[in-house]
Amino acid sequence: MPTRVLLVEDSPTQAEALKLLLEQHGYVVTGAASGEEALRLVPGGQFDLVLSDIVMPGIHGYEVCRRIKTDLGLRDLPVILLTVLGDPLDIVRGLECGADNYVTKPYEPEKLLGRIRLVLDTKALRRRVKPRLGVTVSFLGRQLDITSEKEQILDLLIATFEDVVRTNDKLRASQAQLVEAHAQLETYSRQMAVQAQVSAEKYWTLMQHATDAIFVTDPSGRILESNARAAALAGMKLDDLLGRPFTEFVLGDEVEYVRVQFAKLPTVRRLEAADIHLRHADGHLVCTDLVASLVPADPHPLVFVVARDVGQRNRFERQAVEQEKLALMGQLLAGVAHEINNPISYVLANLEQLEGEAQPIIQILAALRSWITDNAPAEERRRFDGMMAASRLDHAVEEVGQAIRDASDGAKRIREIVRDLKTLAHPDGEAVARVNLNAVIESAIHVAYGEIKYRAALERDLGELPEIIASPGRLTQVFLNLLLNAAQAIEEGDPAAHRIRVRSRREGQWLRVDVEDTGRGIPPEVLPKIFESFFTTKPVGTGTGLGLSISLGIVRDLGGDIKVRSAPGQGTTVTVLLSADTGKQLAAREAAAPVAAVARKLLLVDDESYILRAYGRVLGKHHEMTAALGGRQAIEVLERTGGNFDAVVCDLMMPDVDGIDLHGWVKERFPDLEHRMIFVTGGAATLRAREFLATLSAPWLEKPFEMEQLLHTVAEVAGSSVG
């Protein structure tokens, strides 16, 4: 018959676990959720064992056991108590109430089942032998009456001993684990100490050797720590930075912005601020990019501020922008020069033609007057003089001649200005040549005069100088920069009160050029910085700070130097010193090609009909001319005639088929004609055009040019003579 167990447990979870365990081992289990319910079930339940928790609301386990053993008269019904208590008084109270055994929570299933089997096995023995002990025990100030079988007392004592042994074993195991954990903790502690020391050394090394300035501040912004770069950026000692607010070093106009940004750190944790200016102790500003991070720390978080000096980066970026602007300006100047050169070429050609045609008319008129004066009757002479006076023919002829000469001079001046602009457009790529320094100065004056004339009177004092080998364009750039700086140092509006004087002299092996002005002058503290790249005292948008720096580089490349004397209110004198021997070498020239046969047939190619007519009038006096409007028409003419021309005069820059394309076509179809092509150009505005001219063996002329130069070049190429 299965053993019936009354399980008294107020915890549903523990009750269910115990019930499941007992039922798995063949016990029939009835549950009671309280002491009161257990006492109602015991009398009629015919249970073989009561398993009761001690700590319960209402009637506790001790009272349940006592009533079962005394009031209900069921002394032989075994009662095992479940307890989390481990005090000796608990054991004595168990004896007092008559408990047969107890199990300490948390229990091991095998231990609980073993206790149950032990109690059930000794149940019959206790029925046969009932030596009861009655004793009063005084324990911890309390009198306890114990009346139990000695086996029962022995079981409780043994159970207690087992629990003590088990607890002791656990304590020993825990102590061993604690010793092992302590050893591991000491090892880990030593490792952590070493790591902490290494981390501290790494942190200090990184801090002090970082290329960026690092400030560590509290949440209010006061500096707690900084590195050497931060001290150098601020121009102070490390110790002097401590305790100062970080914003003390921020440019005044940017302080509020920095404060607003840093106030966001508790929310965003990390932020960046670009182009923040920090003030050095000597007053100069350093442009920086800031990165601020909020780092948790005890008792308050820290703010790490990394400041990177971006001044050099910004200078490089500005330099790249300025170089791009200069390159674009060069392209613009080259394009403008090309566009101006075409019309100025035919204007000059026509003016030369007019001047040439006017001379015979003037000579005929002079001869006619001389004949009439010498041979005509007095009455006829008076009539002729009256007609001349009335028609103002003498005056008109003189005025026309003068007008032609003035127009020619003006056109030539435009030509010189355009040449100066073209020289400035591509100075870096310009080959060195023998340079007349005074001519270079005059060229720079032509370009700068529009800026000078409203500010000061210009004076020249140019002495005799030998030619030097240099790039005329780069030297023109130097003197143009100096002249523009001199002009811009003088306010507009009263040119009679100011003077800009250019003086050149030879002093031994040196060629000296002084550019003097009566402008505002340069303060002493600024003077040492004027040759620094991007340094300028001009208002924003009116100066790049590159002019003097570039000029100094050009002059020093020629073995020379630039000196400056200036004082506020007393003007400025800039002295350029150039060695008569610049160290540059002229490029070797190829031997001149042999002169070809006399030319009688010329092909003139240009996309401007005005130029075709102007050049045709000049060349047509000496040669048989064929005109082609553009490269495509020139190809048609050459194909139709089989290339039967003694020379081809061709414009370089033309739409559709340009001179370069035509040259390639001629080289393939009529190779004998390739070296008898003469190119004219208003300006090689593209890299392709400049590279073509640099490798061209045939001659080329730059517009505008003298017609005599064109005639001479044609004669050289075709072997003809102008008659």
Image (cartoon, rainbow, N blue to C red):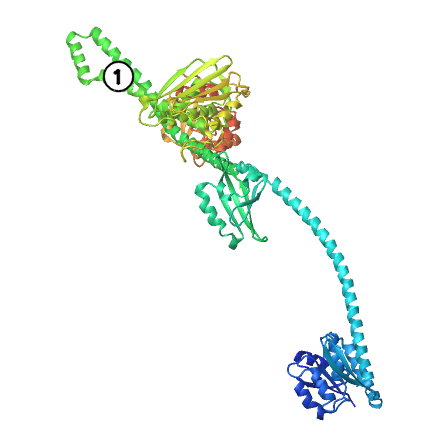
Looking at the image, which residue is at 45% across and 46% down? Answer: 256
Percent of width and height locating residue 36: 66, 87
| Quadrant in the rendering for residue 403 | top left
Percent of width and height locating residue 151: 83, 83
Compared with 69, 376 (above or below) is: above
Percent of width and height locating residue 171: 77, 67
Q: Residue furthest left?
A: 379
Compared with 217, 402 (above or below) is: above
Looking at the image, which residue is at 77% across and 71% down? Answer: 167
Tell me which amino acid carries mark 1: Glu
| Quadrant in the rendering for residue 62 | bottom right
- The answer to whether residue 22 is visible is no
Of the pair 572 and 552, the residue shown nearer to us: 572
- Which quadrant of the figure contains the C terminus? top left
Of the pair 113 and 69, the residue shown nearer to us: 69
Percent of width and height locating residue 703: 41, 26
Q: Residue furthest bottom?
A: 44
Q: How many marks?
A: 1
- Which quadrant of the figure contains the N terminus? bottom right
In the image, is 413 to the left or to the right of 102?
left
Of the pair 309 and 390, the residue shown nearer to us: 309
Residue receiving disc 1 = 398
Q: Residues within 10 Å of mark 1 (few under 14, many from 20)?
A: few
Considering the numbered disc 1 on the image, is that residue within a helix, a strand or a loop?
Answer: helix
Compared with 10, 345 (above or below) is: above
- The answer to whether residue 337 is visible is yes
